[in-house]
Image: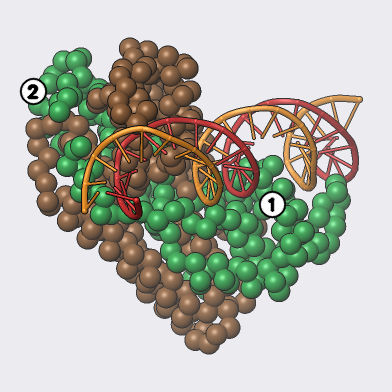
Chain colours: A green, B brown, C orange, D red
Amino acid sequence: MSKLVCLLRQVKVEGYDAGMSLRHALLGLLAEKPASGYDLLKRFETSLSMVWPAQQSQVYGELAKLKEAGLIEVTGTGARNRRDYGITEEGRAELHRWLTEVGPDLAFRSAALLRVFFLWTLSREEGVAYLRDFARENSARQAALEQVRDTATWVGDPVQVCGWLALEFGIRGSQNTADWAEWAAAQLDEQLGGNPGEEPSAADPT
Amino acid sequence: MSKLVCLLRQVKVEGYDAGMSLRHALLGLLAEKPASGYDLLKRFETSLSMVWPAQQSQVYGELAKLKEAGLIEVTGTGARNRRDYGITEEGRAELHRWLTEVGPDLAFRSAALLRVFFLWTLSREEGVAYLRDFARENSARQAALEQVRDTATWVGDPVQVCGWLALEFGIRGSQNTADWAEWAAAQLDEQLGGNPGEEPSAADPT
DNA sequence: ACGTTCATGTAATCAGTTACATGATTTT
DNA sequence: AAAATCATGTAACTGATTACATGAACGT
């Protein structure tokens, strides 16, 4: 087995949260003010899409479960079969528990980074192109997020402040990833210097 | 609707890869050399755990499907019912397609970051504690990964180089996240300055 | 009248997690 | 002989995605 594999045995990753993130995301949104499934859905398509995307069917399904569990309740109805949900005291308690008692969760999945492990199967040109493309995509996102940040003011409202903090994470993360990808492209270009052709580098079969 | 929500409408996130990442991860690992399900499993528990964790049941199940699809084949058997799989030409072609034709995928999920959106429901102390804890966890991971990096040499073998690039991403990402979390804790402390008690800040109900 | 947006749901499927189950081989 | 490790699988369930389906209200 390779060195990297052996060494990484020390750095263990604990499992993906205690699940239930969508459930708590809905509670968090409803803690601000009552809303319908349709309203909540739009939040998942915009502000929350970067950290926790969710589908329409999932949102409506989860709302039904939350109502069943007594964590939210119907607070009003409107035109077109609209139902507004509000968070209950039990719901607020559960949200608080999730935010304070469940330790932070470092787990994440990235298909883009997974591919980096297998870049050696490509030619040098292809591998470098992949990394440069990744860098470009991240820079583009960074620019878009920065524009959002600079268009509004964030002080005052605590709800807005938290959104701004998350946004700033997105900006820094995109920048960081873009920088890394450019660096990695240069490294790959250098390390695989003696392998210019279409042929992927041969694996050492030991 | 709040400003953040409106503004973020511009920054759309395309869906989570074209799925199938585990499938391609297995192909990538087998592209290096033949291995058994058990061998592959250990890779997912170590080097790949940071970017794409996978369970035992999932690995064995996916191997059966890959074999069925003709992307891998049994290349040998050993003691204790062991079967070694090797990648076929079709498998290599599919891996190449995944690495080159499917554009990079920026989507990711983070329960930790999701919680940041709802930190305003906590007292200032609780919110700041959450962020500082997050910073600490990320610094710890950074240190662990740096130790791994500094224990081995990475030049020469292209397979190792790619692992090293991914490892470096983990280090930079952890550092970046830790820095952000410390900064965010300070911001939260400052912005919510006038709210020292146990009481969460009231939401603006407009 | 007609198209769009609002608004909710269901069904089928796939991906991922946890738990259970079994037996062979190697190490102590 | 017992314990640990190697090695594979299945079953039940939860979480997530895609597609289908419907209808009310609003704007033009």
**A183 or B48, which is in the foreground?**
B48
Badge 2 density bin: few <14, some 14–19, many ≥20, Cα 10 Å: few
Position of B189 with respect to D18 (left or right) is left
Q: Which residue is mark 1?
A: A62
Q: Residue at x 65, y 71 (%)?
A: A92
Residue B86 found in image quarter: top left
Q: Chain of mark 2?
A: A
Precedes in sequence: disc 2 or disc 1: 1
Q: Which residue is mark 2?
A: A194
Badge 1 density bin: few <14, some 14–19, many ≥20, Cα 10 Å: some
Q: Residue at x 28, y 59 (%)?
A: B141
Q: Callout 2, which amino acid? A: Gly
Does B86 sit above or below residue A58?
above
Q: Residue at x 85, y 47 (%)?
A: A80
Measure the C-alpha gap from mark 2 to mark 1. 55 Å
Give the mark toward the camera: 2 or 1.
1
Q: Position of residue A147 (x, y in %)?
A: 43, 50
Indicate the quadrant containing the N terminus of chain B: top left, top right, bottom left or bottom right: bottom right
Q: Position of residue A81 (x, y in %)?
A: 85, 49
Question: Is residue B112 visible in the rendered structure shown here?
Answer: yes
Q: Position of residue A110 (x, y in %)?
A: 39, 41
Q: Chain of mark 1?
A: A
Does A73 sit above or below residue B36?
below
Indicate the quadrant containing the C terminus of chain B: top left, top right, bottom left or bottom right: bottom right
Tag shown at residue B151: none
Q: Position of residue A182 (x, y in %)?
A: 23, 39
Q: Secondary structure at mark 1?
A: helix
Count all numbered tags in the image, as a single digit.
2
Q: Callout 1, which amino acid? A: Glu
**A49 or A144, which is in the foreground?**
A49
Position of B58 with respect to D28 (left or right) is left
